[in-house]
Image (cartoon, helix red, strand yellow):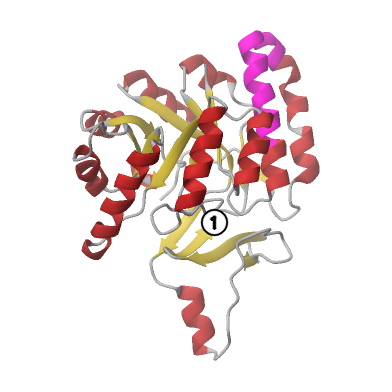
Amino acid sequence: MTELLVTPKSLSHIETLIEKGADAFVIGEEKFGLRLAGEFNREQMKQAVDIIHAAGKKAYAAVNGIFHNYHIPAVEDYIKFLHEIRVDRIIFGDPAIVMIVKQQENPIPLHWNAETLVTNYFQCNYWGKRGASRAVLARELSLDEILNIKANADVEIEVQVHGMTCMFQSKRMLLGNYYTFQERQMKIQREDIDENTQLLLYDEERDNKYPVYEDYNGTHIMSPNDICLIEELAPLFEAGIDSLKIDGLLHSEEYINTVTQQYREAIDLYEEDPEVYEDEKFMLVDPIEAIQPEHRPFDEGFYYKQTVY
């Protein structure tokens, strides 16, 4: 059965998302994982894994940053900790993680997630031979490319079906440096982000607003639209895509709850009868549209269009 993967913002949010039908959760600490919807310190990670496992669900730890030499001692200690609390999978983008995990007793399976780099099945199978049990595909792939990778991959395939995507990342604190230059203090707010507290870059020519934020990993500029594929899931179901991800970055808990509930219904409808899903899929988006931020329209990403570089 297709997995529904979500990104919780807190421990209490995990409990709510379990009720809403989530199968697996991406959790982690900001200094090790990129663009997390919520921050979980070590004690919270342990509690989260206990809650998730008690419900028969899966916990995936994000360790997908790109690390310098001086990061390695902290990363090694963190990987050891993840083995102690026994998360189900470790998400990685840096080969250093593969080497460190291999040194552990009873190594935890890996998910290869290098953002825009995961674009062909040779990459997926390369990392599969080195310990990865899943590949997280780039968001810039078309439906045909996704299906071709799935048909030829020896590992599980994960596809993002809802939420924003990262368009640009710099390890430099671009916003902070700008404010410092202006001799102003910048306040960064990550929790309860809405359109009144979010910093947006405005493209007047295209009338697009790009969310921008800074964290431990630098500066991130996000897409102006949210991917929404709830009406276009049939080809992914038919191909046997293993995991559908909802990325809740920069969205509220209430928003993520609604989206999770609707995608849960979509999966269940298709499992019950594909024709029932086809008949009802157009109504599934209505509750999401009702709470969608006005400045963030839906689109289908690159699902039906070719990436232009």
Q: Main secondary structure of the magenta part?
A: helix
Does residue 15 show up magenta in the picture? no
Q: What is the quadrant of residue 267 in the picture? A: top right
Residue 303 visible in the current orientation:
no
Compared with 44, 186 (above or below) is: below
As rendered, which of 308 and 234 lies closer to the eye?
234
At 72% from the left edge and 37% from the top edge, which residue is drawn? 258
Q: Give, as a single range, the part of the protein colored magenta.
A: 259-277
Q: Is mark 1 on a helix, strand or loop?
A: strand
At 24% from the left edge and 58% from the top edge, which residue is drawn? 73
Residue 276 visible in the current orientation:
yes
**Kind of residue at disc 1:** Met
Does residue 276 show up magenta in the picture? yes
Pinpoint residue 259: horizontal percent, then vertical percent. 68, 36
Left or right of residue 139, residue 97 in this image: left
On the image, numbered disc 1 is attached to which residue? 222
Q: Residues within 10 Å of mark 1 (few under 14, many from 20)?
A: many
